[in-house]
Image (tube, helix red, strand yellow):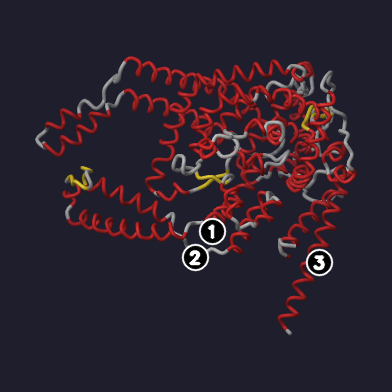
């Protein structure tokens, strides 16, 4: 009712399109004209491309098939071989430059001489300063311990760079083969990838399976199977963060809560969880290994070992992140200090918004569309008092900057003269840079317009249309209330902030490097049994793809376990039953029921299903999915009719 008539109408049209496509209509990808003319001629070449030694079906083994579909998606998302190779090479060059530049800055520059050179310039212009400046670049500088620490950091970074180069060399051949597959088999040249949607690629893959059912891929894969293979590990990771890892990531210390928020979910910790759990849980056929599920002690040992490695590498990671962040953002902050107040979605928000089976490009598209409305919502809560002070500071800075610019235009030599101001001894160029940066920073706090609660609520609703996250508790507290604002800014965080006073993504990641070893030592080992229990009860076997997370299972079995029909009927069974276990049966059943209840409340399964159907309109959902789309369409039609009726009544009252 609150979304408005036009929003309901848009939702109705979307559901109508999905329902019609589910009945056999919908999107039809366009074929390359050249490929259409030479289908018969290409069949022989296609068979040669798809044949391996021994006349074995191409990529028939499940592990190879997972990697192959991931390469298909990566090649499309990077828009061709040239862009893919260039991106990888430049990423390695970025690491190499950071390695060289950090070594030069940490070892070869004597910063005490830099300050002495500045003082000498003010005392003697005859050349004495040149002798002092000549000693700035040295090799090496500092004590033996300092040099050893810096060299250790450089060796670790060099080892990481070497690892990246080895992986790149191994992947080049696969990327070249993938280019040949796209150009000659799918009929999509690199020049057209920028204008080709992923749905076109999946339709071409499905067409190939129909033409060569036994040679291309042994088991038939539809759109859902293809995405399940690409997103297999990401689906499990999202389910773990939503489930058994929630308690282990809570932050209780008040100072850490200021720096990291209520949950200690950082990129460093995410990588370690993937390494310890998700990357280790499958066998060679991408089935969940029963030995892994039966060994909580081994998982605990793996967490402890990862904590030791992280603790040993944490100083080097902090140095690298600091230098990389400075090199990446120094020019941007200097050119436009207002970028200091820009915000981005935190990792916690990304896992909260992420749908199952949602490919990265679809998810990033939603986040990009939600970000402008999120910025406008946050701007509604700017402090009027701070805005008044910022206007005054802006006026002073702009006045001083105008005088400095006038001096520079009239007599440039005066800009090189040092002045003492509040104990600071610098030339006018230095003062001009500081004043300009202060002016930009002050302007970022100036309010534009008069915020109102209705406007703030409207901005949050527009943002939630893309994030699909608007809890009922926010409606109860009021969308424009300070409580909801604090919760929202914990998800939409400043990129850079003042330590302790402001939470920022940079400080959160830096603190996460320090906190991650302790989480791996003290929190996650206690959750090992819960993690394995969760995996046992939320894994299902599918013929084409083997083990997948039940939350990503949009077949009839997934709807019976997590869908709306299951929630209404109160059923408690799994689609194909949990994987067998030999102990803790009662505890496992209780945990499974608790998780099922949480999922029904949040409705993430239904949101994921709708998002997948919208992104893959040619996919045929099961009978339960079609019934769900039908119920949703009837509900939307009813709500839109009510809203339209209320609007008509209001118009009639206004006329009378």
Which is nearer the eye, 455 or 73? 455
Question: Disc 1 versus disc 3: distance between alpha carbons?
Answer: 32 Å
Q: In this figure, which residue is indicated by the disc labeled 3?
A: 641
Question: Disc 2 versus disc 1: distance between alpha carbons?
Answer: 9 Å
First along the sequence among labels 3 and 2: 2
Q: In this figure, which residue is indicated by the disc labeled 2?
A: 449
Is 180 left, or right, of 544 in this rendering? left
First along the sequence among labels 2 and 1: 1
Residue 49, can we see it? no
Q: x, y percentage for residue 74?
A: 64, 34
Residue 404, can we see it? yes
**Disc 2, disc 1: CB below 8 Å?**
no
- Eye-nearest disc, 3 or 2: 2
Residue 309's place in the image compared with 206, above or below, is: above
Q: In this figure, which residue is indicated by the disc labeled 1?
A: 380
Q: Quadrant of residue 639?
A: bottom right
Mark 1 lies on a secondary structure that is loop
Residue drawn 63% across and 38% down?
A: 77
Residue drawn 87% across and 50% down?
A: 23
Quarter occupied by the C terminus:
bottom right
**Disc 1, disc 3: CB below 8 Å?**
no
Q: x, y percentage for residue 421?
A: 21, 48
First along the sequence among labels 1 and 3: 1
Which is nearer the eye, 506 or 633? 506
Residue 384's place in the image compared with 40, above or below, is: below
Is 517 left, or right, of 158 in this rendering? right
Q: Quadrant of residue 214?
A: top right
Mark 2 lies on a secondary structure that is loop
Residue drawn 38% across and 16% down?
A: 148
Which is nearer the eye, 625 or 62? 625
Residue drawn 59% across and 49% down?
A: 488
């Amino acid at each position: 009712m609150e979304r408005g008539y036009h929003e309901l109408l848009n939702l109705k049209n979307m559901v109508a399109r999905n329902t019609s496509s589910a009945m056999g209509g919908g999107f039809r990808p366009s074929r390359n004209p050249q490929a259409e003319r030479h289908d018969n001629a290409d069949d022989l070449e296609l068979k040669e491309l798809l044949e391996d030694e021994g006349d074995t079906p191409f990529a028939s083994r499940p592990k190879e098939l997972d990697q192959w579909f991931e390469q298909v998606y990566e090649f499309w998302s990077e828009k061709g071989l040239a862009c893919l190779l260039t991106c990888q090479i430049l990423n390695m060059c970025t690491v190499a430059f950071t390695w060289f530049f950090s070594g030069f800055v940490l070892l070869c520059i004597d910063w005490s001489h830099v300050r002495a050179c500045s003082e000498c310039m003010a005392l003697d212009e005859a050349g004495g300063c040149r002798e002092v400046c000549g000693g700035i670049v040295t090799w090496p500088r500092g004590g033996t311990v300092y040099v050893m620490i810096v060299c250790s950091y450089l060796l670790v970074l060099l080892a990481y760079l070497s690892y990246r180069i080895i992986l790149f060399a191994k992947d080049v051949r696969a990327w070249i083969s993938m280019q040949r597959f796209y150009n000659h088999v799918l009929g999509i040249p690199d020049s057209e990838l920028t204008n080709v949607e992923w749905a076109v690629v999946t339709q071409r893959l499905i067409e190939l399976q129909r033409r060569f059912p036994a040679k291309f891929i042994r088991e038939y894969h539809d759109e859902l199977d293809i995405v399940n293979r690409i997103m297999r590990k990401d689906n499990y990771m999202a389910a773990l963060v939503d489930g058994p890892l929630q308690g282990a990531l809570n932050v209780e210390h008040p100072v850490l809560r200021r720096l990291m928020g209520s949950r200690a979910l950082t990129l460093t910790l995410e990588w370690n969880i993937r390494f310890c759990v998700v990357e280790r849980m499958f066998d060679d056929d991408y089935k969940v290994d029963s030995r892994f599920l039966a060994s909580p002690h081994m998982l605990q040992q793996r967490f402890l070992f990862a904590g030791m490695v992280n603790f040993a590498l944490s100083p080097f990671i902090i140095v690298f992140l600091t230098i990389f962040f400075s090199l990446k953002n120094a020019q941007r902050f200097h050119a436009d200090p207002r970028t200091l107040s820009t915000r981005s979605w935190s990792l916690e928000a990304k896992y909260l918004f992420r749908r199952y089976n949602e490919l990265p490009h679809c998810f990033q598209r939603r986040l990009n569309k939600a970000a402008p409305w999120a910025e406008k919502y946050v701007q509604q809560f700017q402090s009027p008092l701070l805005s008044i002070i910022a206007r005054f500071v802006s006026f002073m800075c702009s006045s001083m900057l105008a005088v400095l610019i006038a001096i520079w235009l009239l007599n440039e030599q005066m800009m090189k003269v040092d002045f003492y101001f509040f104990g600071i001894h610098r030339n006018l160029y230095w003062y001009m840079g500081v004043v300009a940066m202060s002016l930009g920073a002050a302007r970022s706090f100036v309010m534009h317009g008069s915020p109102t609660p209705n406007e703030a609520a409207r901005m949050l609703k527009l943002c939630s249309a893309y994030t699909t996250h608007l809890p009922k508790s926010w409606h109860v507290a009021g969308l424009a209330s300070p409580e909801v604002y604090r919760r929202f800014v914990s998800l939409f965080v400043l990129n850079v902030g003042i330590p302790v006073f402001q939470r920022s993504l940079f400080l959160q990641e830096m603190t996460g490097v320090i906190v991650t070893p302790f989480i791996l030592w003290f929190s996650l080992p206690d959750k090992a049994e819960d993690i394995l229990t969760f995996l046992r009860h939320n894994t299902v076997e599918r013929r084409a793809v083997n083990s997948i997370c039940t939350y990503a299972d949009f077949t009839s079995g997934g709807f019976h376990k997590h869908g709306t029909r299951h929630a209404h009927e109160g059923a408690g069974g799994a689609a194909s039953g949990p994987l067998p276990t030999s102990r803790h049966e009662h505890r496992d059943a209780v945990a499974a029921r608790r998780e099922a209840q949480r999922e029904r409340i949040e409705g993430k399964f239904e949101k994921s299903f709708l998002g997948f159907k919208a992104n893959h309109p040619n996919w045929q959902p099961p009978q339960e999915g079609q019934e769900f789309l039908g119920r949703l369409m009837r509900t939307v039609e009813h709500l839109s009719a009510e809203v339209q009726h209320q609007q008509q009544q209001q118009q009639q009252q206004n006329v009378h």
